């Protein structure tokens, strides 16, 4: 066997042009299906990992796929809105920690970068996702926000800067008035959808929604000219120039107030983190029976897995095309090897005259084929792995 390997290596070195061509053909043929397979597996892992880390999502009746995507990736509108009463119900049940989300608005574009979703939530969400501040500090009062790492980098924003919310309807000036939020901190990269959004307290999101607002103190001497129509005997009459505040500062935060009861204020989804598997089952049971008319409770992993099973049906076509490509390439390489053996007929006759048996010749040719196949496979695996590593950041950007 040692002698056969020596002769095979010498033969490949002598016919290096032919050997190199065959190895490259094998490499390219195997590289494409291997790369596609690795990227698809990475895609599936990135998508499913966030769903696995989120036990339960509660939302309004409707599409469970839209609900899961809104709560996990902040990318779609939910079927409808819930109210904070549902969050209070989950918290009071003692089965889980409720983390309400309000995801209906986006920021305005900054430095020619399109706006990103504004996520109103509670502090428990940051602990649940294990997020930490790397620059600045956390939320302290109404109007504060913190940026995901990708947002801070792409928009070139730092703590102390300000960012405006975009009105939901640009033609409804009396509706959701833009709010100028102060950036207090930047979050560490998590390689998840959290890197591409702006976080604020859920009450700040309600202010954008128009539920809470503040008003100017018209009795002060420093009120700008044009705001008052008349001021007489301590009574003031304001003009149409008086608008809700668009910026919350330490001086005017006391004037902001909310209308109605908190239980009636909207949320788009609620993430529930049960204390145990038993409590998770009990909470699912309640939403499957007592509260099924009011809301739905879904397991994100099941929803995303069902969605992936539909989307990845195209993977069968990729596998079939790859198999056909391998078969065609194998036939062509077989033809090339057969022709090369024909061309080496004088060499083989010389080997027979030197005393080599037919088995030795077959073993020599087989070793050459094995070495070329092994070399092509290793090169294809290395190239596929390199492509998957190089494309990982781009894949996350594409997904999140």
Image (cartoon, rainbow, N blue to C red):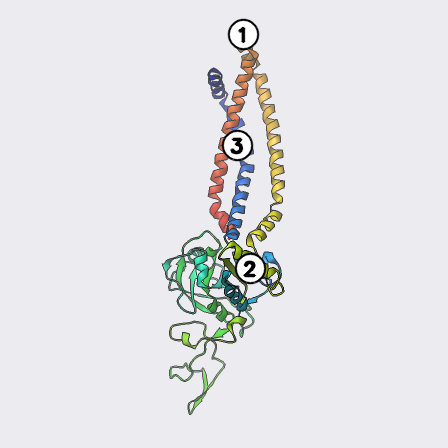
Determine the image quadrant of residue 292. bottom right
Q: Which of marks 3 and 2 is nearer the N terminus?
A: 3
Q: How crowded is mark 3: few (under 14 residues within 10 Å), some or many (20 or more)?
A: many
Q: How many C-alpha atoms fall within 10 Å of the one at disc 1: few (<14), some, or many (≥20)? A: few
Instruction: Measure the alpha-carbon separation of dots 3 and 2.
Output: 53 Å
Along the line of sight, which residue is nearer the eye, 244 or 285? 285
Q: Position of residue 277 (x, y in %)?
A: 52, 54
Measured along the vertical axis of the image, is residue 141 above or below residue 323?
Answer: below
Between circles 1 and 2, the one closer to the viewer is 2
Q: Residue at x 57, y 18 (%)?
A: 341
Residue 22: x and y in percent read 54, 27
Describe residue 141's horizontal placement relative to residue 290 as left or right: left
Residue pointed to by mark 2: 283
325 sits to left or right of 139: right
Asked if residue 75 shows in the view, the reply is no
Determine whether label 1 and label 2 are within 8 Å by CB: no
Task: Confirm whether residue 91 shows in the render.
Answer: yes
Q: Residue 232 is drawn in which quadrant?
A: bottom left
Q: Is residue 14 above or below residue 306?
A: above
> What residue is rendered at 55% in x and 34% in y?
30
- Going from N to C along the chain, the mark reached first, 1 or 3, is 3
How far apart marks 1 and 3 lie (CA) works out to 37 Å
Q: Which percent across, then down, holds residue 207?
A: 48, 71
Q: What element carries label 2?
A: helix
Helix, strand or loop for disc 3: helix
Q: Is residue 218 above or below residue 324?
A: below
Residue lying at the far left of the rendered structure: 136
Q: Which residue carries the number 1 mark?
A: 353
- Tell which tag, 3 or 2, sits nearer the viewer: 2
Q: Nearer the viewer, residue 343 or 70?
A: 70
Pointer 3 residue: 27
* Label pair 3/2, CB-CB below 8 angstroms: no
């Amino acid at each position: 066997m040692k002698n056969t390997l020596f002769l095979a290596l010498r033969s490949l070195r002598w016919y290096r042009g032919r050997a190199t061509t065959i190895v490259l053909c094998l490499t390219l043929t195997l590289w494409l299906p291997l790369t596609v397979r690795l990227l698809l597996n990475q895609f599936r892992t990135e998508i499913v990992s966030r769903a696995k880390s989120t036990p339960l999502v509660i939302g309004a009746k409707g599409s469970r796929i839209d609900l899961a995507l809104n709560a996990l990736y902040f990318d779609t509108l939910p079927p409808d809105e819930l109210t904070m009463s549902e969050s209070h119900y989950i918290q009071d049940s003692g089965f889980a920690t409720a983390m309400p989300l309000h995801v209906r608005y986006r920021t305005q574009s900054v430095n020619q970068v399109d706006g990103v979703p504004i996520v109103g939530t509670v502090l428990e969400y940051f602990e649940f996702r294990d997020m930490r501040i790397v620059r600045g500090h956390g939320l302290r009062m109404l109007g504060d926000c913190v940026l995901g790492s990708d947002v801070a980098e792409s928009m070139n924003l730092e703590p102390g800067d300000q960012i405006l919310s975009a009105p939901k309807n640009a033609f409804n000036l009396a509706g959701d008035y833009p709010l100028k939020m102060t950036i207090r901190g930047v979050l560490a990269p998590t390689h998840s959808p959290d890197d591409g959004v702006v976080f604020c307290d859920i009450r700040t999101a309600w202010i954008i929604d128009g539920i809470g607002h503040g008003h100017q103190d018209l009795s002060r001497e420093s009120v700008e000219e044009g705001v008052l129509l008349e001021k007489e005997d301590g009574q003031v009459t304001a003009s149409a120039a008086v608008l809700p505040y668009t910026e919350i500062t330490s001086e005017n935060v006391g004037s902001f107030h909310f209308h109605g009861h908190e239980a009636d204020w909207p949320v788009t989804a609620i993430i529930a983190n049960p204390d145990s598997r038993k409590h998770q089952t009990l909470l699912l049971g309640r939403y499957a029976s007592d509260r099924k008319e009011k809301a739905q409770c879904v397991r994100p992993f099941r929803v995303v897995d069902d969605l992936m099973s539909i989307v990845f049906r195209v993977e069968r076509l990729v596998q079939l095309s790859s198999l056909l490509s391998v078969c065609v390439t194998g036939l062509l390489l077989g033809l090339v090897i057969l022709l090369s053996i024909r061309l080496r007929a004088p060499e083989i006759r010389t080997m027979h005259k030197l005393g080599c048996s037919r088995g030795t010749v077959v073993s020599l040719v087989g070793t050459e084929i094995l070495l070329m196949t092994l070399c092509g496979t290793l090169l294809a695996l290395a190239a596929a792995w390199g492509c998957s590593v190089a494309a990982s950041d781009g894949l996350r950007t594409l997904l999140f």
